[in-house]
Image (cartoon, coloured by chain):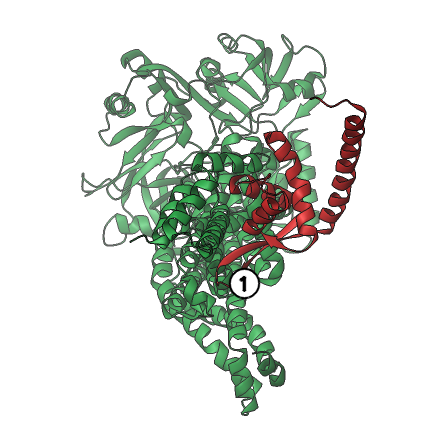
Chain colours: A green, B red
Amino acid sequence: MFDLEKAIQTWRKELATSRHLEDSYVSELEAALRDEVSDRVRHSEPVEEAFHAASSGMGEVRAIGKEFAKVRSRRRGAGALVDNYVRVALRKMRRQIGYALITVAGLAVGLACAILMMLWVKDETSFDRFHVNRDSIFRLVTETKGETAVTLDARAPTPLGPAAKAEIPEVLDFCRYRTNKFYGVKSGDKALYDEVIGIADPSFFTLFTFPFLKGDPKTALEGPRSVVVTESLARKCFGDDDPMGKLLTVAVDSYTVTGVIRDVPDHSHLHFSCVIPIVNMHEYHHVDFGNWNSMFFNGYVRLAPQASPSEAARKISALAARSLNKPNISLRAQPLSDVHLKSDFAFDLDNYAQGSASTLTLFSIAAAAVLLLACINFMNLATARSAGRAKEVGLRKVTGARRADIIRQFLGESVVQAFLGLALALFLLWAILPLFNALAGKQLSFIRFADPGLLAAVLGVTLLAGLLAGSYPALYVAGFEPARTMKGAFPGGQRGQALLRKSLVVLQFTLTVFFVIGTIVVNKQLRFIRTKNLGIDTHQVIATSVRSRAQWEAIAADPRILSASQSVPPGSAPRAAIEVAWEGKNPEDRTPFFPMPVDPEYLETFRVQMAEGRFFERAREADRTDAVVVNETAARAMGSGTPIGKRLTVTDMSTQGRTESNTYTVIGVMRDFHQDSLRRAIEPMVFTNNGPQGPWLNLRISAAGIPETLQFLEKTWKTFAGDFPFTYDFLDDKIDAFYKQDRRVRSILSVFAALALFTACLGLVGLASFIAEKRTKEIGIRKVLGASTRRLVFMQSKEFLAWVLAANALAWPAAYLAAGKWLEGFAYRVRPGISPALVAAAFSLVVAFLSVAFKAARAAGANPTESLRYE
Amino acid sequence: MSSDTLVAASAKPVILSLLLSGESYGYQILQRVRRVSGGAMNWSSAMLYPVLRRMEKDGLILSEWRISEENRMRKYYRLTNLGRQEFEKEKARWISIQDALRKLWAAAPAVE
């Protein structure tokens, strides 16, 4: 028996195989076929014959397809598709402008965060990539294993480079490098004191790649008094004249310009305006190039291309340990590309604009989270509103749209919205980039978008966000059954879907609360740092330098100077351990002690307390040669009982590499004080009084007339130091600077927390208005029956608040875990306590309530006759 | 009627003329064309629908899916204002060609 429906279905399927025939074409052809068949049947033709006649009359599939292809050929392919999606998406958005604003604004904020982070990551990871040998250059980091801790020093023993090159085949070349910011550069009557002078081996310009404009990189630094200058320094000193062969005074000596290089790129951890050969360091700083205890330079090596860095590091370590006769010393080979981001070493003084990989990771995660929040908003609002589009989808399906077509349309719409969001995001970014740069201390710029990789990444992330945001709504809507939706069944109210929406809101607030708690904890720790009693009073203490004893005397005599101490100021103490021995010391005990050369005025200037015994006195000559003071931590390390009277043998290795052993009597114990970041535990300290150990001068000044005091100091400086500029720091600022990075973390984290909260609330506003819309009738009836506006607002908000509470409960453990991890970085830290969680809970509830109540109040305030009439 | 090009060229004015009297759907258009030409113009669906599609894209006609009395989905076409204007232009064009041909044939001797 011939089945017409079956025959038509088969015919239809055959037509659908043509790629030129869209579903709607096929449907129209089907309608025509049915018309003809029924016409023929009316003229008493048998059904089967009527069908065959009608279908063959339509022609072959291929022929039909070709005809249709002609129509489509005008605009076809991706262009037409995109055009169509854009038009449909814009039309839909115009109809519901409020929701569209919420989703697009949310996506824009999320994308702006994501793009900002991409810019930042790109910026931070592009350091030191311009060197031709970048993959085979390593920095040698010295590792000293102590009893309890491992100290890492960014410098390497001075003779290590040449020895390694001579003895280890993998080491092709080496270069030692450091900088000095105080030498000053002079040419004729021009004197520049802000220039960074690089000091390096002659191999510097062959190991690293700094393009030469003039001169020969191979030989430029061979003469002991040769100098290679950057283009801008050359212009500053010599104007338009050819600098080659001209004389430049660096520190106190004349150097001949033997090379001019292009200015050092911003993305270089080596930063200088000129380079002089290292041989001069013997004269300027008494560096002993043959002494293995000398730690003065950063050491770089170039390894053979096929060499294993760890194997080379093992050989170099063996060489150093043997030469130093210290088995606990080893060297790490740090890849050049890690120097900028992955350095946390002592004495990393020449690492220009150092970054932090963990901060970068933290913020990348935060940005991704904000973008995720925005995508969730999209999903939530799109599925919530899908009820309104059920009929549209039903009709499309009836007229022959396939599931894939519906999915494609909805995904297309979300991708279009994502790209609209991108446009807005770029605008936002353009507006906030200067602000962000100030906050993060960066120089990010839009020029980076010229980078094809970054551009591709931005477009990729946008596309991905669009697909992610549209995926669930598209799949969900495509699953509608036309028969039910056309009858007005309401898919938006399904239980499972409402549950999913709730879970998404909970997820959003979980992330938000996490950020809020994080921000509060960081803030709490920073406040703790600011208010903690450091055991030392740095208030109104100025750190400057002094050129001569006469200058010191001239300054100290002034009544505005309450106390003057010529010693290393807190926060810039050298961190090279010394060896300390006393009678009865366990020979296995390798606790590192740290030296602190001071003068008798130290105690008064910094207002440190003595725990026991006495401090140095200027009147007692023996205090200079025979006495030391230790801190409480050192006293504890020396065992139980008072250390006073004990004999202490101190073996000091100076930066110049001279080793000296002296034995002193302990005359006092100083109370512990923090002279370093609170990230570091207080270390055992040994204070000596062997006379000035550097140019430092610390002045406690009277609170009155500080500007006049500074003027006086500058005038005195000019008298004794000539045209070198007068520089000073308030110690408070210096201590504060330890936490610069942490304060940045706080600022940026709070911005992300605010954005997360904003995005999550946008979503709430949208959902609340959607729900209020759906409950218009209910609210109207309740109102007629006598419910107060307040009660109605409460009724609508209740559920949202429950979700937010649930989110809080979920976020707490994660946030406390993360905060605990961050706090572990501080030797001295606050206990976060319950308050951050409570504050975050209260905050999120209030903000969520306000977002919902705003909409709910409007719904509840509406005249019930209106709402009831329309429903 | 034979030549494909002529069919293609005349399709637009024919459809415009048909729709001038009111809306219609695909199968009905085919039937009316055949009837009015006395069977000389026998269009196929494969030819008609792409033309309708193109005319719709050009803004000459509008379409709408509706459920017919037989409870089937059917796509109805009607003229737009632009379509009406286009009809006037086409009409003028075809009349001038017709006039020219008629004059030529009147002057020429019969082929037989």
Q: Residue at x 63, y 9 (%)?
A: A244
Q: Which residue is mark 1?
A: A762
Q: Residue at x 53, y 52 (%)?
A: A107
In percent of width and height, residue A230 lies at 60, 19
Who is closer to the viewer here, A387 or A99? A387
Q: Is residue A170 left or right of residue A407?
A: left
In percent of width and height, residue A667 lies at 35, 48
In percent of width and height, residue A778 lies at 51, 82
Regarding residue A154, the answer to whether it shows in the image is yes
Farthest residue in the bottom direction? A786
In percent of width and height, residue A779 lies at 53, 82
Who is closer to the viewer here, A92 or A761? A92
Task: Report in which chain the residue with disc 1 lies.
Answer: A
The image quadrant where one finds the C terminus of chain A is bottom right
Regarding residue A439, the answer to whether it shows in the image is no
Task: Tell me the crowding category of disc 1: few under 14, some 14 to 19, or many 20 or more residues within 10 angstroms, Cα based.
Answer: many
Q: Quadrant of residue B111?
A: top right
Q: Is residue A222 left or right of residue A93?
A: left
User: What secondary structure is found at the residue carrying circle 1?
Assistant: helix
Q: How many marks?
A: 1
Q: Label 1 sits on what residue type?
A: Leu
Q: Residue at x 54, y 67 (%)?
A: A765
